Image (cartoon, rainbow, N blue to C red):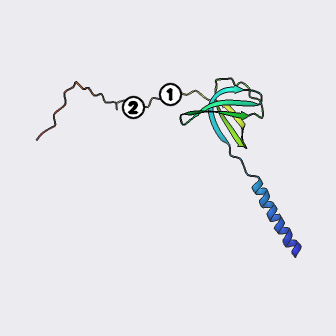
Amino acid sequence: MKNILLSVTMLTLLSFTVAFAAVKVPVMSAAGKVLAVSETSLKIERSVKGETEIMEFVLENPLRDIGIGEQLKVSYKQIGMKYILIRAQKAKKTAVRKSAKKGLEKVFDSAAPVAAPAVK
C-alpha cells in the first residue's frame, strides 16, 4: 500500500514539474525602419511615445529582400536579454488622414461688427 501511495505522489509531483517547466514565452510585435541587416542580426529604429529606440534582433534564418531604410513589422520573443526574431514583413504604405472635419471650422474676423444681443 505504501508503494502505491508513494508512486501516485511521485507521478503527481512529476506532472506538476513538467507543467511548470513548459511556460510559454509571449510573442511581441514592433514596427520600425531598418538600420542594419546581416546574416545573424537585424537592427530597427522605432518610435514609442515620441521617443526613438533601436532594437536589435537575433536571426535564426537570414532575411531575404529586406533593405536598409524599409519599414518592417516584426514579431519576436524576448529570451533573457535577447530579442529572437520570429517573423518580419514589409509594412504597407498607408495614406495620411486629415483629422479636421469639413464644415466645423469657424472663422472669426476681428474687423466684423459684433451683433447686439436681442432685447425684448
68 relative to 101 in the view: left or right: right
Point 87% across, 75% down: residue: 2
Q: Nearer the viewer, residue 46 or 23?
A: 46
Q: Which residue is mark 1?
A: 96
The residue type indicated by label 1 comes to Val
> In the rendering, at what x and y percent does residue 96 appear?
50, 27
The numbered disc on residue 101 is: 2
Q: Nearer the viewer, residue 69 or 63?
A: 69
> In the rendering, at what x and y percent does residue 58 appear?
74, 35
The residue type indicated by label 2 comes to Lys
Identify the element where label 2 is drawn: loop
Position of residue 84 relative to residue 97, above or below, is: below
> Image quadrant for the N terminus?
bottom right
Point 37% across, 29% down: residue: 102
Position of residue 75 relative to residue 17, above or below, is: above
Quadrant in the rendering for residue 36: top right
Point out the residue furthest to the bottom here.
1
Q: Earlier in the sequence, mark 1 or mark 2?
A: 1
Point 18% across, 32% down: residue: 115
73 relative to 58 in the view: left or right: left
Point 14% across, 38% down: residue: 118
> In the rendering, at what x and y percent does residue 94 appear?
55, 28
Point out the residue furthest to the left here.
120
